[in-house]
Image (cartoon, coloured by chain):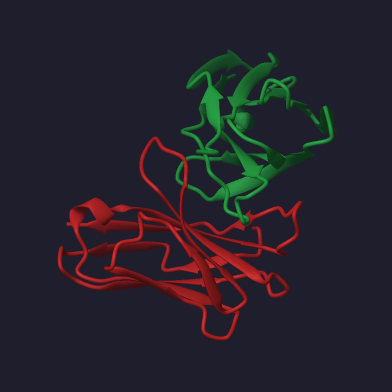
Amino acid sequence: DTGVSQNPRHKITKRGQNVTFRCDPISEHNRLYWYRQTLGQGPEFLTYFQNEAQLEKSRLLSDRFSAERPKGSFSTLEIQRTEQGDSAMYLCATGDGRVQETQYFGPGTRLLVL
Amino acid sequence: SQQGEEDPQALSIQEGENATMNCSYKTSINNLQWYRQNSGRGLVHLILIRSNEREKHSGRLRVTLDTSKKSSSLLITASRAADTASYFCAPRSTDSWGKLQFGAGTQVVVTP
């Protein structure tokens, strides 16, 4: 257990529905990252926060995706109008923001869109 | 792209043998990190090597870094069945602002 928690661990939804995932970071970490991982691939960066500010978004993050970190603590990732191609593992990681930062990953939320 | 690329894609060994995997990258880095992922689970940080370091050890792990060749290697000595996992390198470039860019990883299977 790295100290980063994610909920839910699994989510099955029908195409077109909205889903929201939550990440609770290690409390003293000011950076929070979201990654997406499909089968047989490494994690792909989606977005990250420094405290409550969203500082970078990948081009992978379409308009249907939105992420928030309202008080600089937990974060949510919402996918609107889900598509089958959104099926993946969504990973959250947190770090202390140093140049030599280690990122600590949560267990992930596995999404299946039917 | 600063994405790490691991080689080989897959590795099958017996318990007690050593496992070596390599990583190549393209631009200047602050450090390079190795992570392990057991099937269907989150990633676990193994070791970080800074750009001014050439070799680092942690338990049964040995990591080397050659910035002139833009490559790194991870050696697992005396492998165990529990080492069965996917291994990813993640170079952190000097302009990456913190994000890690993973390759497809090396899938290691250790048979008893």
Asked which quadrant contains residue A67, the reply is bottom left
Image location of residue A79, percent across then percent down: 30, 68
As drawn, is A53 to the left or to the right of B52?
left
Instruction: Give above or below for A12 relative to A52.
Output: above
Q: Tell me, yes or no, if residue B14 can be seen here.
A: yes
Instruction: Give above or below for A53 relative to A57.
Output: below
Chain B: what color?
green
Looking at the figure, which quarter contains the N terminus of chain A? bottom right
Asked which quadrant contains residue A5, the reply is bottom right
Asked which quadrant contains residue A8, the reply is bottom left
As drawn, is B23 to the left or to the right of A88?
right
Image location of residue B109, percent across then percent down: 53, 23
Residue at (58% x, 66% y) in the render: A32
Q: Tell me, yes or no, if residue B108 can be seen here.
A: no
In the foreground, A25 or A95: A95
Image location of residue A52, percent across then percent down: 57, 79
Instruction: Give above or below for A96 relative to B12.
Output: below
Residue at (48% x, 20% y) in the render: B10
As drawn, is A47 to the left or to the right of B29?
left
